[in-house]
Amino acid sequence: MWFYPLPKSWERSDRFAVSLNPKSEYVFRLDMQKDSPHNEILFSLCQNSTDAVFPGYPYGLVEAHKLAKISFTERLQLRTAFQLRAGASCKLIEASLKSMDAHDVLDKI
């Protein structure tokens, strides 16, 4: 578990790169208000990032993702609509559309 300060995003927040569990394969960006108790917040997030299914990701955010995610069918419909509108330019971002990210892991939970 570690955190590293990143360059300032805007004057009212501090930005960090964080790994919230030693078994995590992911590093996340975390923005916190300047006057917030950073160590307490990080400690709390680490305590809530021990789920074996996705170590390093706070369990409460896993639940929020489940409530907010769209269905696989709707995702395919939106992707197809985007590709039709983008036309030939869609080839420029094809790799990005297929890349795996943390949300793909969350969708499997």
Image (cartoon, rainbow, N blue to C red):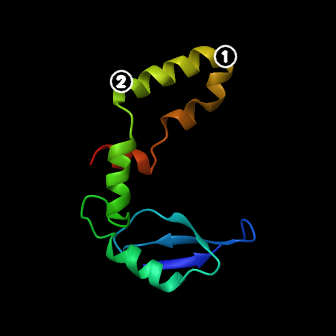
The residue located at (39%, 34%) in the rendering is 70
Question: What residue occupies the far left of the structure in this picture?
Answer: 52
From the viewer's side, name the closer residue of 89 and 47: 47
Which picture quadrant has residue 25?
Answer: bottom left
Is 55 placed above or below 101 here?
A: below
**Pair 1/2: label in front:** 2
- Quarter of the figure that contains the N terminus: bottom left
Tell me where residue 73 appears, x and y as whole percent.
35, 24
Residue 6 falls in which quadrant of the image?
Answer: bottom right
* Residue 37 placement (x, y as % from top left): 53, 84
Residues at marks 1 and 2 touching, judged by CB atoms closer than 8 Å? no
Disc 1 on helix, strand or loop? helix
- Residue closer to the observer: 107 or 70: 70
Within-10-Å neighbours for mark 2: few <14, some 14–19, many 20+? few
Number of marks in the rendered image:
2
Q: Earlier in the sequence, mark 1 or mark 2?
A: 2
Taking the spot 37% from the left edge, 52% from the top edge, the residue there is: 64
Q: Is residue 82 above or below residue 62?
A: above
Which label number is shown at residue 73?
A: 2
Which dot marks residue 88? 1
The location of residue 86, given as percent across then percent down, is: 65, 19
Label 1 neighbour load within 10 Å: few <14, some 14-19, many 20+: few
